[in-house]
Amino acid sequence: MEKLFIHGRGYKTMPEVHASEKRTKLLITVLVIAVIILSAALAALWLSGWMASQQNLAFTAGYQQGAAAAVVEIMQRSQSCQQVPLIAGNVTITLIDVACLKTA
């Protein structure tokens, strides 16, 4: 005759107790793995968003720096009475400083 053990609610045999403990351990293991996978997925999503925002900031800063450098170059060329061609798409204009026209 098998010995009965008090386990939770009611009496169980030793193999039933071991099977119940194995199921509990398996459930805990599965839950821990699920939490780890979920945490990794959330971290990856956060990192992806952060990287996109950093790239956007770098692009904006580069654009502003390039535009400022272009304006400075146009001003320097026009002050030395050089013609400065400005091209946008199919339209081209030549910029000349007004002060250079008055001295000529």
Image (tube, rainbow, N blue to C red):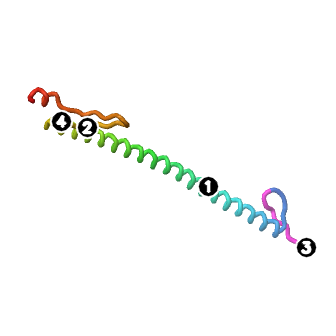
Amino acid type, callout 2: Pro
Nearest-to-viewer mark from 3 and 2 = 2
Q: Residue at x 88, y 71 (%)?
A: 2
Q: Which residue is mark 3?
A: 1
Q: Which residue is mark 2?
A: 85
* Residue 77, quarter of the rendered image: top left
Place of residue 84 in the rendered image (x, y in percent of width and height, measured from the top left):
22, 37
Nearest-to-viewer mark from 3 and 4 = 4
Q: Which residues are magenta?
A: 1-8
Q: Which residue is mark 1?
A: 35
How far apart are the two marked residues, 3 and 4, measured between alpha carbons?
107 Å
* Residue 13 in the image: above or below residue 94: below
The answer to which of marks 3 and 4 sits earlier in the sequence is 3
Q: Which mark is residue 78?
A: 4
* Mark 2 closeness class: few <14, some 14–19, many ≥20 residues within 10 Å: few
Place of residue 100 in the rendered image (x, y in percent of width and height, measured from the top left):
13, 31
